[in-house]
Amino acid sequence: MTDRPTTVLIIGATGSIGRHAAAEALKQGYAVRALVRDRTRAARTLPDGVQIVVGDLTRPETLDAAVEGVDAVVFTHGSTTTERDVRDNDYTGVANVLRALGGRRVRIALMTAIGTTRPGVAYAQWKLRSERLIRASGNPYTIVRPGWFDYNQPDQRKIVMLQGDRRQAGTPADGAIARDQIARVLIDSLHTEAADHKTLELIADHGPEQDHLTSVFDSLTPDPVGSFDGAEDTVDLPVTQEPETFRQDLATISAGKGPRGERR
């Protein structure tokens, strides 16, 4: 990744992380576009300077205007922990946006959740499938799995990035991180070369927040070339045994890539 993006589309912009992401992107000098379902609510919620585009992640025909001309996409959308909701919103939203891009190369930051690789958890498996689509898409990306939102103490602001998704208690014991810090990491990743092709769990430790995160991103292991899964992850979910919906999406989104997973 050599070119800094200029125009960022925020998916889930009116949510608790999306609002912070939109503000952070504006602060960092990006032109910011927000995909929303309710223009009135968005106008009340989002900061001045954000371009509002009405659309619905579950309706592919409404996404063309949102993705037109953007060179970065930040996914902050999320639903409940029911399998159906995560499948129909979290996963389907990622698949639909990738298809709407039509193979055009953009920088991507995807937020999922710590514990995504927990075996046998149906809703987590759909989050994992959305990660796999991003890795297969041929785009530069960073996948961020935050811990529990805002469970951190006031002096707990040091940003920590882990790999391997080994914290799987399903409670705040897995780690906590402030919402504004999640947004900062997502937006910082767009212009940090060391963040490209990295998958990480994001928590906070006691201490002050770092001024720069390049060295933190740099300490991470890149995802293996050609792999559908994150570096150091242990995943028992063979693609051949995945649902037909996912295998069809994977085939469509993977089409047209070069030998190293980049778009032709």
Image (cartoon, rainbow, N blue to C red):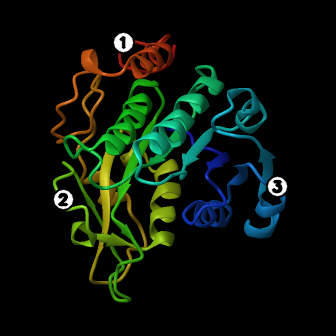
Q: In the image, residue 79 lies at what x, y percent?
A: 50, 52
Residue under the image location 35 percent in, 83 percent down: 208
Instruction: Tell me the crowding category of disc 1: few under 14, some 14 to 19, or many 20 or more residues within 10 angstroms, Cα based.
Output: few
Q: Could you tell me the amino acid type at mark 2?
A: Arg
The disc label shown at residue 167, or none: 2
Asked if residue 151 can be seen in this view, the reply is yes
Residue under the image location 65 percent in, 47 percent down: 8
Question: Which of these two is toward me, 241 or 262?
Answer: 241
Label located before the other in sequence (2 or 1): 2
Label 3: which residue?
39
Question: Which of these two is toward me, 34 or 70?
Answer: 34
Residue under the image location 80 percent in, 52 percent down: 51
Q: Could you tell me the amino acid type at mark 1?
A: Pro
Asked if marks 2 and 1 touch (Cβ < 8 Å), the reply is no
- Where disc 3 sits, the SS reads helix
- Where disc 1 sits, the SS reads loop
Q: Is residue 30 left or right of residue 125?
A: right
Is residue 60 depicted above or below 22 in this figure? above
Question: Which of these two is toward me, 214 or 255?
Answer: 255
Q: CA distance from mark 2 to mark 1?
A: 34 Å
Marks 1, 3: nearer the viewer: 3
Instruction: Tell me the crowding category of disc 2: few under 14, some 14 to 19, or many 20 or more residues within 10 angstroms, Cα based.
Output: many
